Image (spheres, coloured by chain):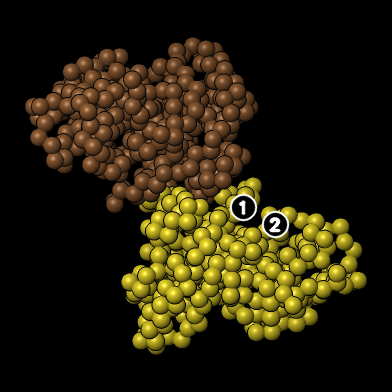
Chain colours: A brown, B yellow
Amino acid sequence: MEEVRVFCPATIANISCGFDVLGVALDSVGDEMVVRKTKETGIRITKLEGQDLPLETNKNVAGVAGLALLEKAEYTGGFEIEIYKKIKAGSGIGSSAASSTGAVWAMNHLLGNPFSKTELVQFAMEGERLASGVAHADNVAPALFGAFTLVRSYTPLDIVPIKNPSELYATVIHPQIEVKTSDSRKILKTTISLENGIKQWGNVGGLVAGLFMEDYDLIGRSLEDHIIEPIRSILIPGFNSIKEETIKSGALGCGISGSGPSIFTFSKGEETAQKVAEAMKKIYKNIGIDFDIHVSKINTQGIKIIN
Amino acid sequence: MEEVRVFCPATIANISCGFDVLGVALDSVGDEMVVRKTKETGIRITKLEGQDLPLETNKNVAGVAGLALLEKAEYTGGFEIEIYKKIKAGSGIGSSAASSTGAVWAMNHLLGNPFSKTELVQFAMEGERLASGVAHADNVAPALFGAFTLVRSYTPLDIVPIKNPSELYATVIHPQIEVKTSDSRKILKTTISLENGIKQWGNVGGLVAGLFMEDYDLIGRSLEDHIIEPIRSILIPGFNSIKEETIKSGALGCGISGSGPSIFTFSKGEETAQKVAEAMKKIYKNIGIDFDIHVSKINTQGIKIIN
C-alpha cells in the first residue's frame, strides 16, 4: 500500500477532575489527512487546507511527529502529507493532536504497523511539544486509542484505555474568542490544598468506575473539578451560565475542554445532547459571541481509514 | 429474631494513591460481636474481650455508632452488645471501624434492614469521630460493603463499590510500635504540589481501572503514593526495606495501612502472599520488633452472620 486517507478525531482533554490525565475522542468532528509513501526520505507537507498553518515540516505538528517516527523506523523512504483541517487551531478540542496522531498512525499503517499505539503516542507528543511547548499526551492518547483514555503516568508513559458507555454523547461549543494556552497555563497555581486534592482523586476514581459500570449518574456526579475549572473558567465568558443551563437541560456534567475556550458536556443519549446544544447556543447568541457547536457520539475506534 | 452474631472484618484504608478515599475489607482478620434486642431502650456494652476498651456506651465506638442509628430508628427498645476484639486498637487496620460497623449492621439486621448501607456508613462514622476525632469513612465503607470501596465524596456522602479481582490477596504486618493517629495526621502538609496531585489522581484512575479489568500489573503500577507515604513512612521503622523486599518477593505493591503502623501489600494468588509474609517477618525479626502478620483473601461480602 502506498497511500492512505484517514479521519483524525477531535478530542476533549482535561475532563473535569481528570486534569492532564483523562481524555476522550469524538466521532463526528475531526480532520482528514492523506499520507503517501515517497522514495525520497524525509517528510513533506504538500497540501494544507482549512487553516492557515505552516507547511514547513519542522514547523508543522504533523511534520514534527512524523519525523520522530521516521527516526525510529527501519525505512529508507519518506512520506508526503496532505492535511484537510476541520478542527480550528486554538479551539481546545485537540486540533494539533489530530494532525500529529493522524500523521504517525497513517505512516505506521503504511509501514505494516511496526510500532505500538503507546509508541505512536510518544511520537505524536513531539507534535504537542511544538504546538504548546509541553509534550502532553491527554489529547493524542484518545485520538490514537479511541474512547476514554487515562494517562496514568508520563515516566514511564502508561496509557490505560477506559471502557466507554454505549449511550454517551458529547456536546462541545467553541466560542470564537482567543484564549492562549500559555495564558491558561500561567494562571494555574503550582500548589493546591490537600483537601481539594482528595476531592479531585475521589472524583477521578468515581468517573473511571462510572465509565466501567456504565453508571451515568455516577459519571455525572464525578464530573467535578475543584482545582482547575474555578481558575480557568474566568477566561471563558458565559461559562457559569452554560454550565447551569446545560445541567438543567439534562447534561450529566459540563467542563472546560482542554485549556479552553471550548466547553464540553456529556449526556446520556443523542436527544439530550441535542437539547443541551440548544441551551448552549441560546446563551452565546444572547451574549453576542459567535460559536461552532458539535454534537457527537464517543469515538471508540480512534483514527480510522476513510475513502 | 432477637440476637445475631457477626464477623466484622479488618480493613485497609488510605490505599497508596487513594488517601482518604480508597479502602478494602479483609476476609480472615476481624472481630466478632453479638448484638441482642432488649425491651429497655438505649445501648449497653455487656461484654468486651480481647482489648482494654471502655464499656460506657458513649465512650465506646460501637455504642456511639449504635446510638446514632437508634436515634433515627422507629424502634422503642434497645440493644445489648458483646464485643470480642481480635483486631488491636491502633494497628491501622480498622479496629474501631470493625466495632462501629458491626454494631450498626447487626442492629439494622435485627430491625429488618430499614437503613441502606450508605446510611449505616453515616452512623458508623460517628464511631470513627469518637475514635480519631475525624468522622472518616474509608474504613467503615469497605467493612459494610465488602471488597474495595471508593468514598467519592463526603458532602454528600457517596460510596462507590469497586469490583474485586478474584485472585487478589493482602498481606498485612503490624509492627508492635505505637504511632498516634494524631501524630500521623499532624505531620501531613495542608498543601501539595499540582504536579504530585496529577500523579496521584492518575494513579487512582489506574488503580480503579485495574480493579475493574482484573489487570494485576496495572494494579501494581498504580500502587504509588507521591504525597502521604514519603512523609508518614518516616514514623514506621523498616518501611523502606519492607517495601523493597516485598516487591522483590512478587508483591504487586506495598503501602501504609490507614495511618500506620501496619504495612499492607497486595499479591496475585495466595502463594505469593505467603512468600511476601516471609519476607516481611524476616525484616522485623532482624530489626527486633515484635509483630502480628495476616495473609488474607479480599473479603467481598463485608460483615456477615456467623454461628
Q: CA distance from mark 2 to mark 1?
A: 9 Å
Q: Nearer the viewer, residue B213 or B56?
A: B213
Closer to the chain start, of discs 2 and 1, is 2
Q: Is residue B185 above or below residue A22?
A: below
Q: Nearer the viewer, residue A228 or B18?
A: B18
What chain does badge 2 belong to? B
The picture places residue A134, in percent across and down from the top left corner, at 27, 37
Q: Quadrant of the N terminus of chain B?
A: bottom right
**Mark 2 vs 1: CB contact within 8 A:** yes
The picture places residue A257, in percent across and down from the top left corner, at 43, 30
The residue shown at (61%, 39%) is: A217
Q: Quadrant of the C terminus of chain B?
A: bottom right
Q: Is residue B10 left or right of residue B256?
A: right
Amino acid found under the numbered disc labelled 1 = Ile
Quarter of the image for residue B57 reads bottom right
The residue shown at (46%, 69%) is: B269
Quarter of the image for residue B142 reads bottom right
The picture places residue B122, in percent across and down from the top left corner, at 69, 57
- Which residue is outermost to the front? A1
What chain does badge 1 belong to? B
Q: Residues within 10 Å of mark 1 (few under 14, many from 20)?
A: many
Q: Which mark is residue B85?
A: none
Is there any visible trace of residue A236 in the rendered image? Answer: no
Q: Which mark is residue B117?
A: 2
Residue holding disc 1: B159
The picture places residue A141, in percent across and down from the top left corner, at 35, 38
